[in-house]
Image: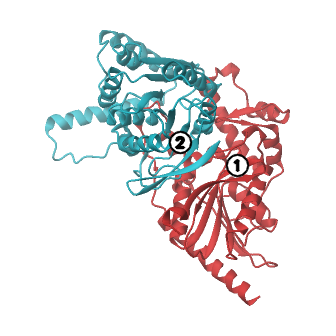
């Protein structure tokens, strides 16, 4: 395959929308990884580092595929029609598509933030041969409450004190079906209620790793702190992105993550070999 | 309809998205990354603008510049370094090459460069690099005319400095400490208000003189393009709570532009144009401007 075709963007028809995917292929992949990205407002900051991780995997003979959830990023769809259930179905759709690509090689689901939570749900339902989570959200409300903080801080800038709403006001708005605009995305009541139903299952909720007894599928839950920005959002990064201030405080934009990536890639490779061997002996 | 497209520049693979118009006048629009954000921009504003403008007959394109979003390449490790290279036109050659390639591939007779913040600066530099050839216009969204700089400059060895430089460095350090102290006080808002009132009075006495922190290269490049007859639309965001008065750069550049520079003010929104109907207002301003400078067939 020509080098230009190994890394390829394309649209897939999933659930009535066109979902943008970017494949980072290799000639003879040892494993495949489906990258399930974070909540749309966090995607802004982490995407370049996330894509670097995909290229790092490809350099270790692991094919990776990233995609944008329906209604976000490059994918089509109206954001008000989206909720966690819909994005979870996008992961299912991507797994179905990848089933035709992997040629029997193990498929790992890897999620960051919200993607960790959704990937875990797909994994618990039997999708994928392994699961890697980086700072997965413990539940849907955790993600949504962080989003509400953005709304409240914007209100500090845009509204006089008397006109400002509280977090509870916004939650009531959402529960009553009134959309709330957050960082350019019109949240719906369905997004809120689908978030209320969603939380990480045991035993994946605690940092660590293990192997499912019944299936032998490996999983790992790692926590990333502020030092891993821009892979995760940090306060220093937000301060550096203030466009009206001529004086810019120090904040990392492009970190060398190779030291962090290496052991996670090694974990995937090691488990991929074990899974492939187990399949051969089965 | 959105499609995934790829270009190669300087050995790097750049990923982008096309939104082709079913019919049109042959003028396309290329959106440039807003700062370090991916090509969809905050709240996916660029993606929605591109969809809508394609429906209006303007094929639209969005690419991640090297090291941003999906594209290959390296960018500086620190935000401030990235801002510095953007305001020094580091991406101009790349954007000019993309614009040329898009015009060739899609048979466009001209291309409008559009961007927020650093994307606007890069649009100006790229158009200037191409000497206006093929650039049908500029859409500059909340473009900063001042220079970004680090709030904590690297510590210098004092031993090698002259007495004068040491004194100046001492004064500068004391000013920073004073500023930080004022900002931590309860009465800071009153002091800030008084400071800006005083500044307003002094700025009147210096009317027409660019502030020392101005991006002179950017201002010169934009003025040159307007002189060449390239039309430009400046769109500025104005939050409802008034911000301190600053130098009127748009008035300064526009004074000699003979109507080629149009200015749309969007009230109640922020720099990223996603608050309080900012996105719809930007779309309306751009559509109205395009209808005068490059009417769709």
Horizontal arrangement in the rendering, residue B130 relative to residue A235 (left or right): left
Q: Quadrant of residue B239?
A: top right
Q: Is residue B94 above or below residue A1?
A: above
Secondary structure of the residue carrying numbered label 1: strand
Give the residue at x 33% y 12%.
Answer: B202
Quarter in which the N terminus of chain B is drawn: top right
Q: Residues within 10 Å of mark 1 (few under 14, many from 20)?
A: many
Q: Nearer the viewer, residue B47 or B172?
A: B47
Which chain letter goes with mark 1?
A
Q: Residues within 10 Å of mark 2 (few under 14, many from 20)?
A: many
Q: Quadrant of residue B281?
A: top right
The image shows a total of numbered marks equal to 2
Q: Is residue A166 above or below residue B193?
A: below
Which chain letter goes with mark 2?
B
Rendered image: mark on residue B62: 2
Q: Colour of chain A?
A: red
Give the residue at x 29% y 13%.
Answer: B206
Secondary structure of the residue carrying numbered label 2: strand
Horizontal arrangement in the rendering, residue A83 relative to residue A222 (left or right): right
Residue B181 seen anywhere in this rendered image of the structure: yes
Marks 2/1 same chain = no
The chain drawn in cyan is: B
Q: CA distance from mark 2 to mark 1?
A: 17 Å
Do residues under tags 2 and 1 come within 8 Å of each other at their CB atoms?
no
Instruction: Identify the residue under disc 1.
Output: A18
Quarter in which the C terminus of chain B is drawn: top right
Where is residue A136? Give x, y as percent. Answer: 68, 58
Q: Quadrant of residue B192?
A: top left
Residue furthest right as drawn: A176
């Amino acid at each position: 395959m020509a080098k230009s075709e190994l890394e390829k963007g394309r649209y897939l028809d999933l659930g009535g929308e066109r979902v943008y995917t970017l494949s980072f292929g290799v000639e003879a992949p040892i494993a495949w990884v489906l990258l399930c990205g974070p909540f749309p407002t966090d995607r802004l900051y982490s995407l370049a580092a996330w894509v670097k991780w995909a290229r790092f995997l490809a350099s270790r003979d692991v094919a990776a595929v990233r995609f944008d959830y329906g209604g976000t990023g490059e994918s089509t769809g109206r954001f008000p029609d989206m909720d966690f259930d819909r994005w979870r179905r996008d992961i299912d759709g991507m797994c179905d598509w990848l089933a035709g690509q992997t040629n029997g090689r193990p498929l790992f689901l890897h999620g960051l933030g919200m993607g960790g939570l959704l990937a875990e749900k797909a994994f618990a339902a039997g999708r994928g041969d392994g699961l890697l989570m980086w700072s997965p959200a413990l539940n849907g409300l955790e993600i949504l409450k962080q989003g509400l903080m953005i709304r409240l801080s914007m209100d500090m800038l845009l509204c006089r004190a008397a006109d400002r709403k509280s977090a509870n006001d916004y939650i009531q708005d959402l529960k009553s079906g009134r959309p709330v605009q957050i960082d350019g995305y019109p949240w719906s009541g369905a997004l809120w209620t689908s978030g209320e139903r969603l939380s990480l299952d045991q035993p994946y909720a605690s940092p660590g790793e293990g192997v499912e007894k019944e299936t032998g599928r490996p999983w790992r839950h790692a926590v990333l702190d502020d030092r891993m920005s821009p892979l995760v959002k940090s306060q220093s990064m937000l301060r550096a992105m203030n466009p009206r201030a001529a004086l810019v405080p120090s904040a990392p934009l492009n970190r060398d993550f190779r030291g962090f990536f290496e052991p996670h890639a090694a974990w995937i490779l090691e488990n991929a070999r074990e899974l492939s061997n187990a399949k051969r002996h089965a | 309809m959105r499609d995934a497209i790829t270009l190669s520049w300087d050995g790097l693979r750049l990923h982008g998205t096309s939104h082709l118009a079913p019919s049109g006048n042959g003028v396309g629009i290329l959106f440039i990354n807003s700062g370090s954000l991916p090509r969809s921009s905050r709240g996916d504003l660029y993606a929605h603008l591109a969809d809508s403008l394609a429906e209006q007959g303007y094929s639209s394109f969005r690419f991640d510049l090297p090291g941003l979003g999906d594209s290959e390449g390296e960018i500086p490790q620190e935000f401030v370094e990235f801002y510095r290279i953007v305001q020094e036109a580091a991406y101009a050659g790349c954007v000019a090459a993309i614009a040329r390639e898009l015009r060739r591939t899609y048979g466009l007779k001209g291309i409008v460069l559009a961007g927020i913040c650093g994307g606007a600066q890069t649009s100006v530099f790229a158009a200037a690099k191409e000497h206006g050839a093929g650039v049908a216009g500029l859409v500059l969204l909340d473009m900063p005319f001042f220079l970004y700089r680090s709030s904590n400059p690297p510590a210098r060895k004092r031993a090698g400095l002259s007495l004068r430089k040491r004194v100046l460095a001492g004064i500068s350090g004391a000013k920073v400490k004073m500023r930080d102290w004022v900002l931590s006080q309860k009465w800071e808002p009153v002091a800030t208000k008084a400071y800006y009132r005083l500044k307003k009075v002094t700025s009147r006495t210096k009317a027409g003189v660019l502030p020392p922190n101005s991006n002179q290269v950017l201002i010169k490049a934009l003025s040159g393009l307007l002189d060449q007859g390239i039309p430009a639309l400046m769109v500025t965001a104005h939050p409802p709570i008034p911000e301190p008065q600053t130098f009127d750069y748009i008035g300064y550049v526009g004074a000699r532009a003979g109507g080629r520079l149009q200015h749309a003010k969007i009230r109640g929104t922020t720099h990223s144009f996603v608050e309080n109907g900012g996105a719809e207002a930007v779309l309306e301003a751009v559509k109205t401007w395009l209808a005068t400078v490059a009417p769709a067939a």
